[in-house]
Image (tube, rainbow, N blue to C red):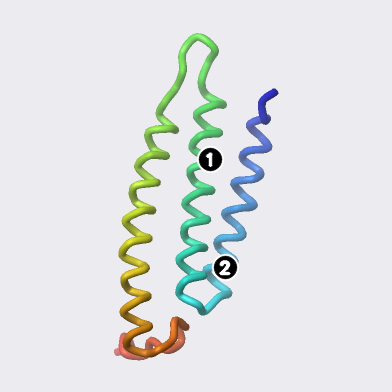
Amino acid sequence: MTVPDEHLLILAAILFATGVAGFLLRRNAIIVLASIELMLNAANLSFVAGCRMHSTSAAVNLDGAIFTIFVILVAAAEAAVGLALVIALYRLKQTVHLDALNELEG
Protein backbone atom coordinates (compact mmCIF):
# COMPACT_ATOMS: atom_id res chain seq x y z
CA MET A 1 0.00 0.00 0.00
CA THR A 2 1.44 3.36 -1.01
CA VAL A 3 0.51 6.85 0.05
CA PRO A 4 -1.10 8.91 -2.74
CA ASP A 5 1.03 11.72 -4.10
CA GLU A 6 -1.65 14.31 -3.39
CA HIS A 7 -1.55 13.41 0.31
CA LEU A 8 2.21 13.92 0.35
CA LEU A 9 1.83 17.36 -1.20
CA ILE A 10 -0.90 18.31 1.29
CA LEU A 11 1.32 17.19 4.16
CA ALA A 12 4.23 19.19 2.71
CA ALA A 13 2.02 22.28 2.49
CA ILE A 14 0.90 21.87 6.11
CA LEU A 15 4.50 21.41 7.28
CA PHE A 16 5.65 24.44 5.30
CA ALA A 17 2.82 26.61 6.66
CA THR A 18 3.66 25.50 10.20
CA GLY A 19 7.30 26.40 9.62
CA VAL A 20 6.42 29.83 8.24
CA ALA A 21 4.13 30.50 11.21
CA GLY A 22 6.85 29.46 13.66
CA PHE A 23 9.41 31.62 11.85
CA LEU A 24 7.22 34.70 11.83
CA LEU A 25 5.58 34.43 15.25
CA ARG A 26 8.31 33.18 17.57
CA ARG A 27 11.15 35.25 19.01
CA ASN A 28 13.28 32.38 20.31
CA ALA A 29 16.30 31.73 18.07
CA ILE A 30 16.17 27.96 18.54
CA ILE A 31 12.49 27.83 17.56
CA VAL A 32 13.24 29.97 14.49
CA LEU A 33 15.99 27.54 13.43
CA ALA A 34 13.67 24.58 13.98
CA SER A 35 11.02 26.31 11.86
CA ILE A 36 13.52 26.76 9.03
CA GLU A 37 14.37 23.07 9.27
CA LEU A 38 10.66 22.24 9.09
CA MET A 39 10.31 24.31 5.92
CA LEU A 40 13.32 22.59 4.35
CA ASN A 41 11.86 19.18 5.19
CA ALA A 42 8.57 20.21 3.59
CA ALA A 43 10.51 21.12 0.45
CA ASN A 44 12.19 17.70 0.56
CA LEU A 45 8.81 16.01 0.78
CA SER A 46 7.60 18.04 -2.19
CA PHE A 47 10.65 17.03 -4.22
CA VAL A 48 10.07 13.36 -3.47
CA ALA A 49 6.34 13.61 -4.24
CA GLY A 50 7.06 15.36 -7.52
CA CYS A 51 9.62 12.72 -8.38
CA ARG A 52 7.04 10.01 -7.75
CA MET A 53 4.38 11.82 -9.76
CA HIS A 54 6.55 12.25 -12.85
CA SER A 55 8.19 8.84 -12.94
CA THR A 56 6.80 6.04 -15.02
CA SER A 57 6.81 2.38 -14.18
CA ALA A 58 9.48 1.72 -16.82
CA ALA A 59 11.90 4.51 -15.83
CA VAL A 60 12.65 5.72 -12.34
CA ASN A 61 13.19 9.47 -12.03
CA LEU A 62 15.79 10.32 -9.37
CA ASP A 63 15.89 14.09 -9.83
CA GLY A 64 13.77 14.71 -6.74
CA ALA A 65 15.97 12.46 -4.61
CA ILE A 66 19.11 14.26 -5.80
CA PHE A 67 17.62 17.66 -4.95
CA THR A 68 16.61 16.26 -1.57
CA ILE A 69 20.19 15.26 -0.82
CA PHE A 70 21.38 18.78 -1.64
CA VAL A 71 18.70 20.31 0.58
CA ILE A 72 19.73 18.01 3.44
CA LEU A 73 23.34 19.14 3.02
CA VAL A 74 22.30 22.80 3.11
CA ALA A 75 20.14 22.13 6.18
CA ALA A 76 23.07 20.50 7.97
CA ALA A 77 25.29 23.49 7.25
CA GLU A 78 22.52 25.86 8.34
CA ALA A 79 22.06 23.97 11.59
CA ALA A 80 25.78 24.05 12.37
CA VAL A 81 26.18 27.77 11.67
CA GLY A 82 22.86 28.64 13.29
CA LEU A 83 23.59 26.79 16.50
CA ALA A 84 27.03 28.38 16.67
CA LEU A 85 25.37 31.79 16.40
CA VAL A 86 22.84 30.86 19.10
CA ILE A 87 25.66 29.80 21.44
CA ALA A 88 27.51 33.07 20.76
CA LEU A 89 24.30 35.03 21.40
CA TYR A 90 23.70 33.20 24.65
CA ARG A 91 27.27 33.82 25.85
CA LEU A 92 26.98 37.51 25.02
CA LYS A 93 23.43 38.30 26.21
CA GLN A 94 22.52 35.34 28.46
CA THR A 95 19.34 34.88 26.40
CA VAL A 96 18.33 33.33 23.10
CA HIS A 97 15.49 35.77 22.34
CA LEU A 98 15.95 37.59 19.07
CA ASP A 99 14.62 40.84 20.53
CA ALA A 100 17.88 41.16 22.48
CA LEU A 101 19.81 41.69 19.24
CA ASN A 102 19.89 45.45 18.97
CA GLU A 103 23.57 45.73 18.01
CA LEU A 104 22.77 44.96 14.37
CA GLU A 105 20.61 48.08 14.04
CA GLY A 106 22.17 50.94 12.10
Q: Secondary structure at mark 2?
A: helix
The 10 Å Cα crowd at callout 2, few under 14, some 14 to 19, many 20 or more, is many
Q: Is residue 25 above or below residue 97?
A: above
Q: How many marks?
A: 2
Quadrant, the C terminus: bottom left
Q: Is residue 97 left or right of residue 104?
A: right
Q: Is residue 53 left or right of residue 94?
A: right
Q: Which residue is mark 2?
A: 22
The residues tagged by marks 1 and 2 sit, at their Cα atoms, a distance apart of 20 Å
Q: Which mark is residue 46?
A: 1
Q: Is residue 52 above or below residue 30?
A: above
Q: Residue at x 39, y 46 (%)?
A: 72
Q: Residue at x 33, y 61 (%)?
A: 80
Q: Is residue 98 above or below residue 1?
A: below
Q: Secondary structure at mark 1?
A: helix
Which kind of residue does numbered mark 1 sit on? Ser
The 10 Å Cα crowd at callout 1, few under 14, some 14 to 19, many 20 or more, is many
Which residue is nearer to you in this view: 91 or 63?
91
Q: Residue at x 55, y 33 (%)?
A: 49
Which kind of residue does numbered mark 2 sit on? Gly
Residue 4: horizontal and vertical position, in percent?
67, 30
Quadrant, the N terminus: top right
Residue 34: horizontal and vertical position, in percent?
49, 63
Q: Residue at x 50, y 77 (%)?
A: 28
Could you tell which of marks 1 and 2 lies nearer the N-terminus? 2
Q: Is residue 9 left or right of residue 39?
A: right
Taking the view exactly as shown, the residue that stands out farthest to the top is 58
Residue 69: horizontal and vertical position, in percent?
38, 39
